[in-house]
Amino acid sequence: MRWLFRIALTVTLLFITNARIGWMQEAAPPPLDVRTDLPAQIALQYYDDLPTTWLTMAGGSLVQVAPDFLMETESFGFAWSPDCTRYAFSAISPADEDEQPFYRIWAGDYGSDEVTPVSPIGIDGSASQIFWSPESTRIGYHVFNSSGIGVNIATLETGENFSIALELAEPRIAGWIDEARLIVYNTQMVAPNVYTRDYYLVTLAVGDYEMAPLPGQYDLVLPDSAHGDRFAALTYFADENHFGLMLYALDGTLLQELAPAVWSVGLYWSFDGTMLAYQDVDGVPHVVDIETGEDRALALNPYSDYVMGWSRDGSHLIYRYPLAEFPSNNGLAIYEIATDTSKLLLSPDPTDSGLYSWSACIP
């Protein structure tokens, strides 16, 4: 039986003020080999004395984002908007450093020299792990403090910030269904080193929200925000020691078995919701067509380690790949599905440089 929570929200109106990014064109860029003839925007974090975040611009130049800010690094703390026109990141601004040394969420337009605060001053904890809504009108993010984890939603046009899923001990965001709905989950330890996840559908409203359990038991849920009425999910089969990939309606109805045995990494919806990328138990990337059920194994290539996302038009996949000499230092490549070819986007030079995180967006 479905049950609903309705509670009054504690709403904090965010009085938006802008801060100059202050592009430091004179700063020495990281020692990287970056392809400039490929249609990708790249954000990267580079560690010298302090972590810095850089963006590739038209023509291949590198510019530093908010050079006076202290960047959050444990979860990278950077996310492109779905259409690649905006970005958000987690950082401590110089103005907050002494008064309230917590990480806040900031957003900017790609190519602009200003960033705007998204999360308000006064949140008890550091904000990170950013989830853009499909149309980029809202940002969901996690708040970490001594009491645990919380989930906040920011509406960018109005500056409204509020908390959701307050009934859950440590809620986390699984992903958005549409501009007004998202799926969250709560993790529980049921035995030593054994955890389960309970998933919930949250519907947002002004000053209120509803939360209902997502029927069924799943190990990982991937909402299809293009269609808004279904999600892919992993279910672990202990007797066979692998995950199965299924497609479900929001009411828990099984719609389709997508793949019998998959890894739990490299799972990404295409932006139009027609295809899903996954990797089989041998690590081979696949693309499955949801309408036809056609499953295509993609050739392993020198740059493939696991899938990190799609281009907007569904023609390319973004890959991470490890450098043999320094496995913890990774590069970035794109794979063209139609031609079965890979091209290197980014690699450190030298390979033991301070590059350790990046995020790519292909309009």
Image: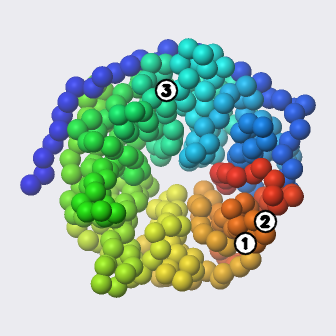
First of labels 1, 3 by sequence position? 3
Task: Determine the CA span between mark 3 and mark 2.
Answer: 35 Å
Question: Viewed as shown, does residue 86 lie left or right of 61?
Answer: left
Residue 198, how many percent across, how many down? 26, 55
The residue identified by callout 3 is 119
Q: Secondary structure at mark 3?
A: loop
Residue shown at 75%/51% (left/top)?
355
Among the 4 quarters of the image, the one containing residue 246: bottom left
Among the 4 quarters of the image, the one containing residue 290: bottom left
Q: Residues within 10 Å of mark 2 (few under 14, many from 20)?
A: some
Question: Viewed as shown, does residue 149 lie left or right of 201?
Answer: right
Answer whether residue 249 is visible to the viewer in this image.
Answer: no
Q: Determine contact: label 2, label 1, CB under 8 Å.
A: yes
Task: Determine the CA span between mark 1 and mark 3.
Answer: 37 Å
Residue 288, how many percent across, how many down? 48, 76
Residue shown at 38%/46% (left/top)?
172
Q: Secondary structure at mark 2?
A: strand
Q: Is residue 252 above or below residue 153?
A: below
The residue identified by callout 1 is 303
First of labels 3, 2 by sequence position? 3
The residue identified by callout 2 is 344
